Image: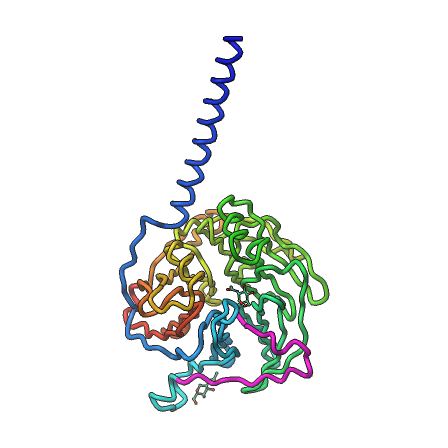
Amino acid sequence: MGSQSSFLHFMHRLVFWVLFAMVSCFVLRVLIVLDLNKRIYNHTPGPCRVLTEKYKGTAGLTYVDSQKRVYITLGYGKSHNLTTNTGISFYNTNRSDGRSQQEMYDLVEMSINWNGYEYQNLFIPTGIDSYSSSNGRVLLYVINAHPDHQCIHFFQVDNTKLNYRKSICDSSFTSLQDLSVVGPDRIFFTNMAAFGRGWAQVVEFALQTGQGVVYYYDGSKLAIGAPSVNAPTGIGYDSKRRILYVGSLIRESLFAYKVAKDMTLELMYEMMLLTSPIGIFVESKTGDVWVAAHPVLHESAWHYTHPEKKNVHSSSQILRIRIQVSEGAEEGSSWVTTEPYANDGATISASSAIVYTDDQMIIGSSFGRLLHCDLTHSHIT
Ligand SMILES: *[C@@H]1O[C@H](CO)[C@@H](O)[C@H](O)[C@H]1NC(C)=O
Ligand SMILES: *[C@@H]1O[C@H](CO)[C@@H](O)[C@H](O)[C@H]1NC(C)=O
């Protein structure tokens, strides 16, 4: 009797301490993931100005070199029940076409010809990428973040008009984030988590179960490019070196995949960033990877759950990662990271997209403004 009860007593204590250790580990991990230890110091690489604050969100950007245009998706906040218009605009980065100082910073709103698409009212554009063919045709691919209509829409650009071509939608799309075009109608894209939002998603992230997926669409059918990725967000493609970069919100890192001829992905390495990457821009000439990040996740968590509150901000951060290619060394074995821009959230909150071209930096945000900066101290970046 006595030995049995002391055995039970021991087991109770053991179970208690094991559980206690597990819970402590879990709490510690959550605290680290939330970046409670971080502080952001404001700096810019030169003079900056707001291009627009008319929309609740400028969450997606893509640069088309042949036109010197940056296309911008507007109104992501609507997916979080904010009242805002949605749509697509472009910004012309050409500085040698004789426009006035005022015209230089104007956005051009595009009209969309939906060709009778029946769900055209359920359109909340977010991630965007482009494809330019050699005959000058420009195609845009846009993620729709509408909670009831998560799809990718295909458009063709006709000067200031967009012509709708087709859509891909699937019941497995629960939290589409971003896409990257690797050829005409060939795209890799990320679905961040099994659960679209709310507490189920928070638990999924905390357990770090890696239910995110990188999909591949080859123009006719859908396939899985990389299964079980931990909260994949932004995605960017270096076409010269055939490397696909995928950001992880929770691991605060970038995964680099080699894209094989048959479009399968092979994981090359993981770059730890210590900040959550949201938008990725790959500079085609240099292969430099620019990242728009949420550096302080507990702020972002508040911001995303209370996007309507004017006094709740989330810090913004832009990183530039230069991959060092040294003779003989393994490709991508080292890199140098600089921080051209950082803000505590008062000027721009929750930076989620970045384009860099011709000493100009354009930064988009999840629920707010679009910022333009001239890089006058190029040597810093
Ligand atoms: C938005 O509003 C709808 C309808 O009122 C509600 O069902 C949904 O949960 C809300 N979504 C968010 C993110 O608050
Ligand atoms: C930029 O502007 C110059 C001067 O008007 C023009 O020659 C050039 O074609 C423009 N570039 C593009 C890509 O539109």
Which secondary structure type mostly characterizes the magenta part of the structure? Answer: loop
Q: Which colour scheme is used?
A: rainbow
Q: Which residue lies furthest to the front in this view?
A: 1
Measured along the vertical axis of the image, is residue 284 above or below residue 14? below
Quadrant assignment for the C terminus: bottom left
Q: Of 114 and 255, which appears nearest the observer?
A: 114
x, y (%) of residue 334? 42, 49
**Res 321 → quadrant:** bottom left
Quadrant assignment for the N terminus: top right
Q: Of 231 and 239, which appears nearest the observer?
A: 231
Q: Which residue is drawn at 58% across and 76% down?
A: 132
Measured along the vertical axis of the image, is residue 137 above or below residue 219? below
x, y (%) of residue 204? 53, 48
Residue 300 drawn in magenta: no
Magenta extent:
106-126
Taking the image as shown, residue 116 lies to the left or right of residue 27, namely: right
**Res 277 → quadrant:** bottom left
Q: Is residue 6 visible?
A: yes
Residue 125 drawn in magenta: yes
x, y (%) of residue 274? 39, 50
